[in-house]
Image: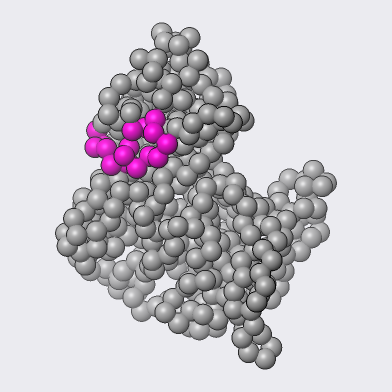
């Protein structure tokens, strides 16, 4: 995707809230999602300011037409994700034309808007597979010192490291998280019960668009056409369970839940925020040829800033502002999504439409950019919050809210909506 007229920073919308500073959803964004209102059917929509364009209503009104528009109005966006990129781009341009200031169809389009405050947001699609990468060198070095003395695995600079996570437990923002049970190391050996070390991991993810055939690798130069769009991802972690069980890799310490933001920002919308890949250390080994491409070096990165906020029960009762735990950038990772996709398929693995690929924890070098509590506290020294509270791990009643902004001088910043989850007590589990 290249920069085009839909990215013009001078464009304004007749939806007033879309022009407000700080909005996630200006007219240059137009992400897709799935929503419903009480008593009404679930359907697809497009975010604009504090409103949702009901795509199905726009189809009925004759404002939209075509296969891409039909797919965008469905209660599952999988068919839209599989639609040819040119058709998706044409749909985006048409929706923008309907919402731009001075649009002749404004009066008709107004009847197709739904206030976000009245809507419940749903999963954009149910991923058939979820692969979680580990692309941040600072995260690996800080989060695994007991096993590796803070050193990186030998393969880190030659391939993006990943594991196959659990797709069925991926949920949309706002779904509470029941504190998971698991087995962990106790004073006298293995113990079982609700995790005592609940953590978050701030990550970024993409949805796969076009699949590849089983046995057919994906070349790096062609990988971007397999990306439909992006969302924020919180890979919740039970650290005590994870560290006790990880022989073949994470299982119960991770499988219980991952949360994503509800709006999928298209690859086209992020075109202005492409940037060069971060520089590799001078002493790092070269990646193999299939993971090197001149185009990827020039614009495989994304200028996106991420935040993780913590809101405790005491903060809510006091009306206090949530505390910022993490302030980081996508450039904290050392591999692009295109490289992740190419590596994933290099052995012939077939990626499918709607599959979810995550960057892994996006921790930077500074403590302020550490993207999980195990790095912030080391599991030993609690972090002190602005109101005087302290947290070693997440407690029941805590709400973790992640946000992100794509930013670049000369363009209108765009966001992704919140990726939020409230920790609630563990279910009553009789052993």
Q: Is residue 340 visible?
A: yes
User: Which sits in the foreground, 355 or 282?
Assistant: 355
Question: Going 38% across and 39% down the picture, which residue do you hit?
Answer: 77
Comparing 8 with 106, the one in front is 106
At 37% from the left and 58% from the top, the residue drawn is 129
Q: Nearer the viewer, residue 307 or 311?
A: 311
From the top left corner, tell me how far across and down residue 416 is, in percent. 50, 41
Give the number of marks: 0
Residue 273 in picture, x, y percent from top left:
40, 41
Residue at screen point 27% across, 70% down: 286
Q: Relative to 146, is 29 above or below?
A: above
Compared with residue 234, is residue 4 higher up or lower down, i.e. above or below?
A: above
Residue 243 sits in quarter:
bottom right
Q: Is residue 348 above or below residue 99?
A: below
Q: Nearer the viewer, residue 55 or 379?
A: 55
- In the image, the segment drawn in magenta is 71-86
């Amino acid at each position: 995707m290249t920069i085009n007229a839909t990215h013009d920073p001078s464009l304004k919308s007749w939806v007033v809230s879309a022009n407000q500073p700080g909005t996630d959803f200006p007219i240059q964004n137009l992400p897709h999602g799935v929503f419903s209102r009480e008593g009404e059917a679930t359907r697809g929509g497009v975010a604009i300011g504090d409103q949702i364009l009901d795509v199905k209503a726009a189809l009925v009104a004759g404002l939209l037409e075509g296969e891409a528009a039909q797919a965008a109005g469905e209660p599952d966006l999988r068919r839209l994700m599989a639609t040819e990129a040119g058709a998706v781009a044409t749909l985006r341009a048409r929706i923008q034309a309907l919402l731009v200031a001075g649009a002749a169809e404004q009066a008709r389009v107004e009847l197709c808007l739904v206030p976000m405050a009245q809507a419940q947001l749903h999963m954009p699609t149910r991923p058939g597979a979820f692969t979680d990468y580990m692309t941040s060198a600072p995260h690996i070095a800080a989060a695994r010192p007991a096993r590796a003395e803070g050193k990186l695995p030998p393969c880190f600079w030659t391939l993006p490291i990943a594991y196959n996570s659990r797709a069925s437990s991926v949920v949309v923002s706002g779904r509470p998280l029941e504190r998971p049970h698991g087995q962990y190391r106790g004073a006298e050996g293995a113990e079982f019960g609700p995790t005592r070390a609940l953590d978050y991991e701030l990550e970024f993810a993409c949805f796969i668009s076009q699949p590849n055939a089983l046995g057919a690798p994906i070349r790096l130069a062609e990988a971007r056409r397999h990306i439909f769009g992006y969302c924020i991802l919180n890979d919740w972690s039970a650290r005590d369970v994870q560290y006790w069980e990880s022989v073949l890799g994470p299982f119960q310490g991770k499988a219980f839940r991952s949360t994503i933001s509800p709006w999928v920002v298209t690859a086209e919308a992020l075109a202005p925020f492409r940037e060069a890949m971060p520089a590799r250390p001078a002493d790092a080994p070269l990646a193999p040829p299939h993971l090197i491409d001149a185009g990827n070096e020039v614009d495989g990165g994304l200028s996106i800033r991420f935040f993780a906020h913590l809101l405790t029960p005491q903060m809510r009762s006091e009306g206090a502002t949530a505390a910022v735990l993490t302030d980081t950038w996508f450039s904290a990772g050392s591999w692009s999504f295109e490289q992740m996709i190419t590596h994933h398929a290099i052995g012939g693995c077939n990626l499918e439409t709607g599959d979810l690929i995550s960057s892994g924890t996006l921790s930077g070098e500074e403590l302020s950019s550490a993207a999980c509590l195990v790095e912030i506290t080391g599991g030993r020294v609690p972090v002190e919050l602005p109101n005087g509270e302290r947290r070693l791990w997440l407690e029941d009643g805590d709400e973790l809210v992640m946000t992100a902004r794509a930013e670049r001088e000369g363009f209108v910043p765009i966001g992704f909506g919140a990726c939020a989850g409230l920790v609630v007590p563990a279910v009553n589990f009789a052993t």
